[in-house]
Structures are given as C-alpha cells and as structure tokens.
C-alpha cells in the first residue's frame, strides 16, 4: 500500500467548513488512481494529506505505513514526485536547470551534481521529450511544455510514486493525451500514480481505479466502469450526464457526455 | 543556461576585483602616501614608520569593515529576496535598519553611551528588537507567513522610523547632527575590534546561507514545490530570515544605514550570471564587498577634507551601472 487515508478530516484554518469529511481511501502500489470530482470537492486537499504537506485533524494519512506529515521531506522526495498546480513559472531558469532541481533530495545543497545525477536528468528530459528544449528558459515555454517540464522534474527525482494535480488543465487534446500516456507508461514500468483530473474520459481510459469526491466525501471508488456511471455522475456534478460505452474501430472505452438540456432530447436521470 | 565555466570565471573575477579594490583603497586617503612609500611601509622592517601606522590602523580596518559590511548586506539581500520572493526585498525592508537607527540615535542624542562601541551595541540592540518583533508577529503555529512578515516588517520599520524622528526632534543641535550623520552610514569609526566582531558574525552567516543554496533555489519556485523537492520549507524560511536579519543587523550596527548594496548587488549578479544560489551567494558576497570598499574609498577622497556619506556614493555609482545592466538584461533575456 503506498498511500492510505483512514477517516481523514481536514478543515483549513479560518474556514467554517471541513474540506474533507472522513475520507478513507487506499492507494495500492503499482496502480494508477484518478481522483475526480467537482470543483471544491476536496481533491487538492486530499493530495496534500497524502503528501504530508497537511496533516489531518482527525483520522490518519499514511505513506508506506508512516504518517505522511512525519516523513522528512527529503526522504519523501526520493520516493514521491509531484506535479502540483500553480501558475506558469516565473523564475528565469533553463529547462535543464529546472529539471535538475529534481535531484535536490539526492545532493548536498551546496554541491554540484554527480555523474549519476546528470544521467538521471538527461533520461528524464528524454522521457518527457524535452531534449531539444533543454536550454530554453522555462518562462518561454508553452503550457504543454511547462507541464512536461514539471513531469520531467518529477521523473528526475527517481520516484516510485507520482502525484499529479490537474496536470492537463488548460492543455489541448494532444497535450492532454501526451501527459496521460507518460503517466501510464510510468505505471506500466512498475510505478504508481495518483492523478487529480477533470478529464473524466481520460481518467476512465488511463487509470485503473477512480475515486470520486464530492463535498469532502468519497462518493464512489472502484474501476472506471464502477464509478463512471450516469446516475452517479449526474448526482455528484448536479448535471445530467450520459456515459456511453465506446467500441468503435478498435477503440474501446467510456465516453462521458454532459447533456445540454436546452437542446438534447430530455431523458430523465435514473433514480439511484 | 549560464555555463558553469562562465560562472566559474565570474567567481574568480569577482574575487580578484575584491583584492584589487582593497589594494586600491589602501592607496588613497588624506595622508598623501605614494605607492613606493606604501610598499616600503608594508615591509616587516618598517614596523616603526608612521605610514605603516596609518595603513594598518586607519585605512585597513576601514577597508575590511567596508568589505565585510558590503558582503553581508549583499548576502542578506539575496536571502530576503529568496524568502519573500519579492524583487524589491532588501536588508532594511523589514525594520532592521530602523530598529538599529533608533538604538543608535537614542544612544547618541540622549548621551546614554560613550564611544563608537557603545553606539554599535545600542544599534544592534535596536535591530534585534525589530527582528524579534516582526518574527513574533509573522510566526504562528510553526509557520512563518511571508505575507504577514512583509507587512509586519514594513509597519515596524515605520514605527521605529517615527521614533528616530521623535528623538532627533527632541535632541539638542550637536547630538542631533552626529545622530543624523550616523543614519547616513560611515566607516569612520571602524576598528580592528569591531571588525573581529563583524567577521565573527557575517562570515559564518554567509557560509550558512551558502549551505542552503539548493533549498533557496527550490523556494524561489514556490513553497509547495520546494516541499515536494525535499526542502523542509518552514525550517529553511526561519533560518533564512534569521541569517538575513543578523547579517543586516551586523552591518548596520558597524556602519550605520547604507542602502542600495543589498538591493542591487544581488540583482546585478543575477542579471550577469543567473539565479542559482550556489553562485549567487558567493558572488554577491564578493561583489557587495568590492562595491562598498570602492564606494568608501570614493567617499573619503572626492570631497576632501569632507567625507561624503558612503550610502550616497553607492547610490551615485551603483544606480547608473545597474540601470544599464537592467536595460541590457531585459533586452536580451527575460528576467
């Protein structure tokens, strides 16, 4: 078990409502788990508890059996690579300098990188297809390139787990596919990944398990076919949503289609 | 990416610059000593010469004080800019200088202490009170909130600034003038004793800052990313704040308020050699030291026998240089 939340509650200081209300979830090693849910459902808070940057006020959040917030950050960073949300980079450094920061947990803060570190950085750049951009400034990259650079930096940490918070926000279809493919390859090569995303159909295609959060609670968890169901999604997102099983020219998967009540033929939401 | 070779050459060049600046500063002063006289006076055989006494007991302590203060202020600026992620951050932003100024001005005007050492101690006490107050306000539940830090710092600075005004208003003429001169900054009171204290303070603090280099690089991204890259964010922020404040406090206690060095030297180094703290810190240390040594040499020679406040000189020579750099830097690469 890489991550484990047990009846975890969290309320931000100066907030009246709990962001998470008793969430229990287990994230097994070697799988790709997607965390989905409406805006404000508590997805990012959940990731912060998993990563130990926040500590639950009650319940527990464990990484490899130990409270996540008790891990020395350096040891955590050797195991878990994170692609966090956040605006475009403002620090004028090169892509390779940015990716080299992924070696921070392995080198002394004042020392130069060693041979092995350099090799890991180059292989991370190659993996994210950034070799040609290595000497460009991160401040000059497009949105998709920035996300790839963040992913490369996480790869350079040589992690066993990736945690990604909306890695494909603002990206076009191709770049979205590219990121999910890279994460899937990472899992297929023996890693684990937790991806927070709003792309329900890509979550369904690339993840082994889905956790659906709503209003700080875990509404559903399981395989894509168990979670991506019309009645569940319609209720949680408070919007009529159809789920179509897709089987077309060798493409298989679930297609999540929000209904436009003004135009689409009315179809009552199935009672749960 | 600046190659590590160009940065290595830059580091060497700045070290050389500091040596050259210190040597040149040794050669200028009111007592008109020619270069051969200086050379002779520095030979071991010349232990009795008056020229030797001037060099070793008047000029050199002053040069060393300028070098140490400039180096400390520049490193302090680097740390504040990294901690607050604000390019306008500088050693005096958060009240260190105002606290020190109030301490020193009160001591000078009210006749509470005698001698430069007493003034330095009073200044240090004022600076430490300001540092502790700001820290106490911004530090809650194990976290240092940098937004609160900056606001608390600016407000505490205003408060102590008002205190300085009040004391100056109430002080009688002569004392008020010496107090006012103190706030402008000068190395006129430098002594070996003070330099030992200054070095004992600034050199370890600068080394400790260098020891945080990669953590500061990560913090420059944002605090959350830094945590995910293995940095104990709160610990590093706390240490950085204390190191930066103590470096500023040491410099301001020794020499009064000398602006500009801590703001502009780090930016100039960044524009020339990039943002990696492993180079930024030692380079700023050397460049800050060189700038103040040169500025002080100019301060005591350009208007002889008067002495121009060294802070005026740093601004007058530094600003045009920096503007050119800024213009070229922005034209070439994004900051």
Image (spheres, rainbow, N blue to C red):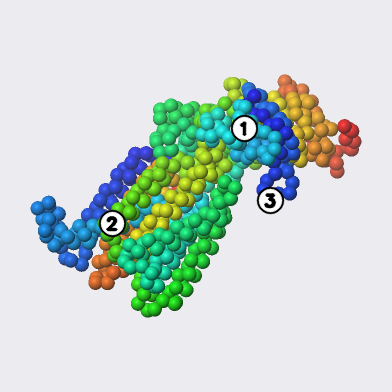
The residue positioned 57% from the left and 42% from the top of the image is B224
Residue B84 left/right relative to A161? left
Residue A168 left/right relative to A259? left
* Chain holding disc 3: A
Quarter of the image holding residue A187?
top right
The answer to whether the residues at label 1 and label 2 have Cβ atoms under 8 Å apart is no
The residue positioned 49% from the left and 70% from the top of the image is B162
Q: In this rendering, does residue A272 appear at all? A: yes
* Chain holding disc 1: A
Foreground tag (2 vs 3): 2
Note whether A167 is above or below A92 in the view shown.
Answer: above
Q: Earlier in the sequence, mark 3 or mark 1?
A: 3
Q: Which mark is residue A98?
A: none
Q: Which residue was labeled with disc 3?
A: A14
In the image, farthest residue toward the left:
B45
Cα separation between marks 1 and 2: 51 Å
Quarter of the image holding residue B171?
bottom left
Residue B296 position in % (x across, y down): 29, 62
Q: Which mark is residue B193?
A: 2
Asked which secondary structure carries label 3, the reply is loop
Quarter of the image holding residue B321?
bottom left
Cα separation between marks 3 and 1: 24 Å
Residue B126 left/right relative to B60? right
Cα separation between marks 2 and 3: 51 Å
Residue B191 position in % (x across, y down): 27, 59
Foreground tag (1 vs 2): 2
- Mark 2 burial class by Cα count in 10 Å: few <14, some 14-19, many 20+: few
Image quarter where the C terminus of chain A lies is top right
Asked which secondary structure carries label 2, the reply is helix
Q: Which mark is residue A67?
A: 1
Q: Nearer the viewer, residue A68 or B103?
A: B103
Residue B194 position in % (x across, y down): 30, 57
């Amino acid at each position: 078990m890489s991550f484990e939340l047990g009846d975890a509650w969290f309320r931000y200081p100066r907030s009246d409502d709990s962001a998470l209300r008793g969430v229990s979830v287990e994230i097994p090693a070697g799988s790709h788990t997607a965390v989905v849910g409406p805006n404000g459902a508590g997805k990012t808070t959940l990731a912060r508890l998993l990563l130990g940057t926040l500590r639950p006020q009650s319940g527990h959040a464990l990484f490899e059996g130990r409270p996540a917030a008790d891990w020395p950050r350096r040891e955590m960073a050797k195991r878990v690579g994170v692609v966090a949300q956040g605006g475009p980079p403002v620090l004028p450094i090169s892509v390779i300098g940015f990716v080299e920061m992924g070696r921070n947990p392995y080198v002394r803060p004042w020392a130069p990188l060693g041979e092995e570190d350099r090799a890991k950085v180059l292989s991370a750049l190659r993996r994210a297809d950034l070799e040609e951009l290595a000497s460009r400034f991160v401040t000059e990259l497009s949105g998709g390139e920035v996300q790839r650079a963040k992913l490369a930096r996480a790869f350079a940490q040589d992690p066993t787990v990736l945690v990604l918070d909306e890695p494909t926000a603002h990206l076009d279809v191709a770049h979205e596919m590219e990121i999910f493919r890279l994460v899937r390859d990472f899992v297929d090569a023996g890693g684990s990944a937790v991806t927070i995303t709003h792309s329900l159909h890509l979550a369904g295609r690339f993840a082994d398990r889905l956790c659906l959060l709503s209003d700080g609670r875990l509404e559903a968890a399981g395989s894509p076919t168990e979670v991506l169901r019309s009645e569940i999604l319609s209720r949680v997102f408070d919007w009529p949503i159809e789920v179509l099983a897709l089987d077309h020219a060798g493409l298989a998967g679930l297609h999540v289609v929000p209904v436009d009540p003004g135009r689409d033929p009315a179809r009552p939401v199935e009672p749960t | 990416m600046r190659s590590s070779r160009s940065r290595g050459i830059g580091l060497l060049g700045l070290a050389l610059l500091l040596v050259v600046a210190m040597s040149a500063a040794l050669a200028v002063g009111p007592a008109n000593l020619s270069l051969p006289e200086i050379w002779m006076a520095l030979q071991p055989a010349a232990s009795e010469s008056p020229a030797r006494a001037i060099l070793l007991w008047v000029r050199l302590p002053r040069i060393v004080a300028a070098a140490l203060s400039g180096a400390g202020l520049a490193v302090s600026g680097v740390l504040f800019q990294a901690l607050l992620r604000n390019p306008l951050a500088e050693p005096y932003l958060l009240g260190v200088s105002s606290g020190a100024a109030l301490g020193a001005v009160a001591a000078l005007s009210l006749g509470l202490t005698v001698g430069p050492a007493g003034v330095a101690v009073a200044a240090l006490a004022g600076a430490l009170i300001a540092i502790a107050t700001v820290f106490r306000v911004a530090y809650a539940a194990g976290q240092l909130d940098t937004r609160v830090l900056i606001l608390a710092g600016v407000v505490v600075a205003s408060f102590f600034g008002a205190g300085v005004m009040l004391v100056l208003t109430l002080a009688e003429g002569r004392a008020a003038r010496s107090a006012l001169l103190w706030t402008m900054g000068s190395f006129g009171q430098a002594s070996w004793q003070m330099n030992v204290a200054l070095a004992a303070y600034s050199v370890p603090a600068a080394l400790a800052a260098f020891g945080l280099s990669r953590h500061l690089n990560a913090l420059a991204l944002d605090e959350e990313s830094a945590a995910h890259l293995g940095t104990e964010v709160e610990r590093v922020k706390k240490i950085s704040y204390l190191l930066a404040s103590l470096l500023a406090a040491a410099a301001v206690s020794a020499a009064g308020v000398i602006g500009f060095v801590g703001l502009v030297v780090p930016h100039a180094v960044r524009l020339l050699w990039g943002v990696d703290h492993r180079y930024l810190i030692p380079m700023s240390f050397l460049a800050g030291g060189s700038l103040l040594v040169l500025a002080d040499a100019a301060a005591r020679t350009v208007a002889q026998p008067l002495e121009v406040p060294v802070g005026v000189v740093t601004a007058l020579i530094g600003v045009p240089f920096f503007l050119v750099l800024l213009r070229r830097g922005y034209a070439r690469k994004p900051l």
